[in-house]
Amino acid sequence: MGSFSLMHWVIVLIIIVLLFGGGRISSIMGDVAKGIKSFKKGMAEDDEPVQPKRPVAQIEAPPSRTIDGTATKANEERKPG
């Protein structure tokens, strides 16, 4: 009761061909094939060994100046005074 017979599938295919046209269906199938090929190519390229990245060099901040002109380190806490 839940399955379609061969006649149902033939009618559905005829309606699809009438709606989209034969040329449109073949171009869609060609696009699908290109997509599958590019996917397989992308998966094959992932097999190459990945080179480890160099660690990023850290740059220390220059000492900041206070209002009176004395230098302080950027990470020191300022004491009220």
Image (cartoon, rainbow, N blue to C red):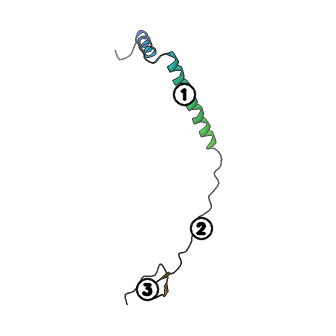
Task: Tell me the mark number nearer the camera, choosing from 3 and 1.
Answer: 3
Q: Quadrant of residue 47?
A: top right
- Mark 3: few/some/many CA within 10 Å (<14, 14-19, 20+): few
Question: Is 45 situated above or below 66?
Answer: above
- The reply to whether callout 3 and callout 2 are in contact (CB within 8 Å) is no
- The reply to whether callout 3 and callout 1 are in contact (CB within 8 Å) is no
Q: Alpha-carbon distance for marks 3 and 1?
A: 68 Å
Q: Nearer the viewer, residue 12 or 24?
A: 24
Q: What is the secondary structure assignment of the residue under circle 2?
A: loop
Sequence order check: which comes first, mark 3 or mark 1? Answer: 1
Q: Nearer the viewer, residue 73 or 51?
A: 73
Q: Which mark is drawn over residue 31?
A: 1
**Residue with the mark numbered 3:** 67
Q: Alpha-carbon distance for marks 3 and 2?
A: 31 Å
Q: Which mark is drawn over residue 75?
A: none
Q: Which mark is drawn over residue 57?
A: 2
Q: Amino acid at mark 3?
A: Ile
Q: Position of residue 59 (x, y in %)?
A: 56, 71
